[in-house]
Amino acid sequence: MPEYQQTVFKVLTLNHIASAGLECFPRDNYQVGENSAQPDAILVRSHNMLNMDIPRTVLAVGRAGAGTNNIPVKAMSERGIPVFNTPGANANAVKELVLAGLFLAARNLLPALRYVETLQGDDDTLHTLAEREKKRFSGIELPGRTLGIVGLGEIGRLVADAALKLGMKVIGYDPNITVESAWSLSSEVKKAQSIEALLRASDFITVHVPLLDTTRHLINEKSISNMKQGAILLNFSRNAIVDEEAVLDGISSGRIKSYVCDFPSRKLQRHESVVTLPHLGASTLEAEQNCAVMVVNQLVDFLQNGNITNTVNFPNTSMERESSYRIAVANSNVPNIVGQISTDLAKAGLNIHNMVNKSRGEMAYTLVDVDSPVPLQLINKISSISGVLSARYVPFPTRQVN
């Protein structure tokens, strides 16, 4: 049998992580820092990992945020490494920014501010000029207007609830809505049968979908042609979901009254009908703390128990510990992997106490609790099964020393 002893997990941080999250690492069992060599896990926010040489010791990557475009997810999947994120942790921060965007656009606040900043003269002169020109910035009120929400995840649902409380009508479209999201959605939100139907009915449109091949340039020349004349478009999701050229053409034609987004660019900069912000969606103290706490807790549970919650590449897989001896296996979703694992366990004389297996697309994950210690040779044998990406022994409260 191999020897086991209490040891320390090493976590490499690639960005500043809120101290509220770092404090969630058990102090006696974790070394956390920006210079951790041979780390067991990587903790990241915005750092670009796409061309990074990720050490072979890494077991998991945790992103303190929802998007993972800065992480080589496919390469991590091929190595059996889960990539954790924190969906919903920054949802309230984004919701509040969307509401700010609604008010900015509805009341023409930014053009009005820009105008006032150009005024010169004494107070009487400023007052006279402001009163004379204020009609140029006359806006609209939100009650009774229709807000179309594309994407009804955590952020979309919070935006819908807030808009309803402001007296707006809300219509939503999300072909991939989960059962949980559907149950959480207010019955006052009307369902659009297509994105085209939503665009035709909406005075304001806000998008809250991840950036995928299917959502890249979701808002394009064709979809903009379906919008109401004078619609207001908001994008606090991902830049590439909206085709900037098409939006500018839509503004020129009058189809779009204004565009509010969280992604500045040369094309959009200083355009009088565009408001661009410096990607402030999750930039609040509370959101940074929520994301840090959430991702750290997920990493700790994975490293110490093998449990997976909120990854972008593996299924959620958790099992209460009823034994001190656990094996965690990440594999391609192909037939007979579980059967081969069970056979190897039986040959080694190990009794399965409990087991759970989950799949998600091409990926699968298995947790097996057994009644006695697991020899290193068995972990190596399971690792050699065709289709197995990674296998590790997760004894509690110890782990194997290599």
Image (tube, rainbow, N blue to C red):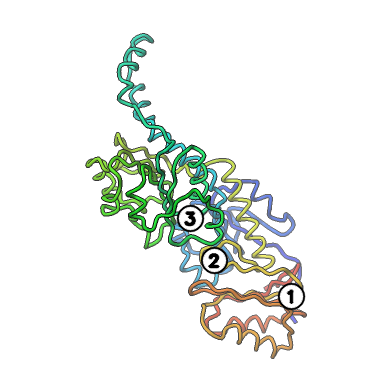
Q: Earlier in the sequence, mark 3 or mark 2?
A: 2
Of the residues shown, which amino acid type is indicated by label 1? Tyr
Q: Residues within 10 Å of mark 3 (few under 14, many from 20)?
A: some
Dividing the image into 4 quarters, which one contains the C terminus?
A: bottom right
Please identify the quarter of the rendering in which residue 302 is found. bottom right
Residue lying at 61% horizontally and 76% vertically, measured from the top left: 357
Circles 3 and 1: CB distance less than 8 Å?
A: no
Tell me how far mark 3 sits from mark 1, CA to CA: 34 Å
Looking at the rendered structure, the secondary structure element under dot 2 is loop
Q: Position of residue 363 (x, y in %)?
A: 52, 73
Q: Position of residue 118 (x, y in %)?
A: 32, 21
Which residue is label 1 attached to? Answer: 325
Mark 3 lies on a secondary structure that is: loop
Q: Can you give x and y, in whole percent of width and height, for residue 53 in the image?
A: 48, 64
What number is the disc on residue 55? 2
Callout 2 amino acid: Pro
Where 260 sits versus 321, above or below?
Answer: above
